[in-house]
Image (cartoon, coloured by chain):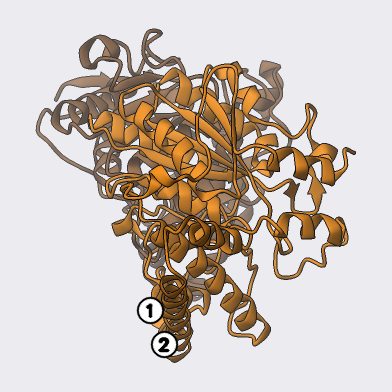
Chain colours: A orange, B brown
Amino acid sequence: MASSTKSSSKTSSKSAKSSKNGKSDAGGLDESDVGAKTDHLELFRQMYLIRQFELACGENYSKGFIRGFLHLYIGQEATGVGAISTLRDDDYVVSNYRDHGHALARGVDINRAMAELFGRATGTSKGKGGSMHLFDVVKGFMGGHAIVAGQLPLAAGLALAQQYNKTDALTMCFFGDGSTNQGIYHETMNLAAIWKLPILFFLENNMYGMGSPIENVRAGGIDFYPGMATYGIPAVEVDGMDVLAVQEATEVAVERIRKGDGPQFIEAKTFRFVGHSIADGQKYRGREEVKEWEERDPVATFPTRLLEMGLVTADEIAETKASVDEAVAKAVEFAEQSPDPDLSEIHNDVFA
Amino acid sequence: MPEILLREALKRGLEEALENDPRVFMMGEDIGQYGGAYAVTDGFLKKFGPERIKDTPISEQAFLGAGIGAAAAGLRPIVEFMSISFSLVAFDQIVNMAANLRYMSGGQISVPMVMRAPTGAGVQLAATHSQSFETWLAEVPGMKVVCPSTPYDALGLMRSAIKDDNPVLVAEPALLYTIKGEVPDEYYEIEIGKADVTREGSDITLVSYGYGMGPTNGAADRLAERGVSAEVIDLRSLSPIDMDAIVASVQKTNRIVVIDNARRRGGIMAEIAADLQQTASEWLDGPVMRVGSIDVPWPYNRGLEQEVLTDADDVLAAVAEGYGL
């Protein structure tokens, strides 16, 4: 097995690099970003919101308010936030079981998301879905799917509908490195490519499928984007700890898709700082490796960079944090005070 | 009334949906240029074009899953499996996605998708191409399952399936594609979840569906020769099951045999039998008798296959064993 230190330092040495059939000039931050349409503070706010939301989830799992499986997005905030920031309202976002971050970045109401985790009637799925199955159709957030790679053809079908209806809307589909060993992953890549579907495949490579390092379960190393050449799908790699790099790479891909170029693929190298789920003791990896990635924590490093560049003030950061902290506390309060679903709900929503 | 083949009845149902609703499109292996393995979609590609008649790669998971996504986005896909045995490859998508999405999303997402699949044994296709998995899917909440035995039912059920806002499996008995039957020109639908009493009688109830209706009707004819009046029920829908129709018949006849062309073990007839012993035992003069094909993988050899298949003799044996008739 290749050492994890190696994978870490390798990815940290660049923000984006091109595959043979695609390129990205995504880079870091510079003064020219001042006045850019993207609101850096908003990117920070979203990442910080996800972080605080996830911490609150962990806390309320310990208290017994949240049950079932709970997969936290801590460490991966820059990928979801950067990628989703490039979308329009009529686009779709599809996620896997680690879906809280994607949902919040897409604008799903924090109160209803937390209530769903608490299993309450006010939740996004009225308490019938739970952590792994967040949905908000009004926001174009099409789930929350918990069979690994099972969401890929669903996303392809949503994209097919966008193509069929002759719109230039697109579908962004998130999945992890574990998905890539499922047959359905390859089937969907092929289908999307031959039909030129308006879909962005977004791989969040966090180096582990549950407790299995990629090197143990995949032939061909830890890079997945070169394999997309097989399907003729343009693919790039990006530093998933750099929200602006992710945003820039995604903007390029999104523009191509809207032009009718067909599917695009982005692989973000990222890392979860916590276990696979709340029950994971992380016996399969060393503390050093986690620490090394934590030094690049986007929620900590991004505001520091913004401050150093003079793009935001310390007051603005502090105000943002305070308002997010309050919103998260209120979401927990909202969830806790919401009623359980009535038992009569059992039979509702089976059939349309 | 004009007579047409069951295959032609299905084709008419599909064609009028494609003509009348721009949201309807079809996907499947070789449904376009080839015209469909059983020629149901012959000519569709030319008439409706490649955007609506989509030939797919041999990737059942991906194209069935794409159908689910397209349906979730408001289209009305009709997805064909070349054989219901191939649906096993896509069972994760059918069960975990198509059937569960509505409930998991708290009612936010509907999946108005039709799955079509030839089903059943009898043409020497051996173990992997002769099975009848409509009985498995009938027990999945969120799924509807229908299976016609006549051209009339095939058209009426197809119309209802396409109009339904839920995932519906239309299991098409492969052996019946070329049977003929009367189909009126006037528009009609057949409600999903309603059984059909195809023959009224007073002495015993025989329940079956799809290809099982052949041996069931054969047994009813032979019982009539002996002066035994059989009431015959064609389920038409396996999910929901029309238990009311079955119980009403049992209240009249006090005797029942349930007959499946699929393997005997498990399946839809076991469900009906279990339900009846709980809800209708006071009306029954004997045990609920269950007939099905022998519980082995389907053999290739014609003699072996015919022996495994349910036939009228099996039905009559059950009538005699259970009720001495």
> Residue B281's spot in the image, x, y percent?
52, 72
Q: Amino acid at mark 1?
A: Thr
**How crowded is the residue under tag 1: few (<14 C-alpha within 10 Å), some, or many (20+)?**
many
Chain containing the residue with disc 2 = A
Within the image, what quadrant is residue B32 found in? Answer: top left
User: How many numbered discs sit on the rendered protein?
Assistant: 2
Instruction: Please name the amino acid that badge 2 sits on.
Output: Ser
The residue at 33%/47% (across/down) is A36
Of residues A327 and B169, which is closer to you in this image? Answer: A327
B259, B147: nearer the viewer: B147
Viewer-side residue, A38 vs B144 = A38
Q: Hey, which quadrant is residue B142 in on the image?
A: bottom left
Kindly report the distance in space between the C-alpha atoms of the residues bearing marks 1 and 2. 6 Å
Relative to A200, is B152 on the left or the right?
left
Quarter of the image with the C terminus of chain A is bottom left
Circle 2 SS class: loop
- Quick one: which residue is furthest to the bottom in this view? A337
Q: Residues within 10 Å of mark 2 (few under 14, many from 20)?
A: some
Q: Which residue is mark 1?
A: A122
| Residue marked by disc 2 | A338
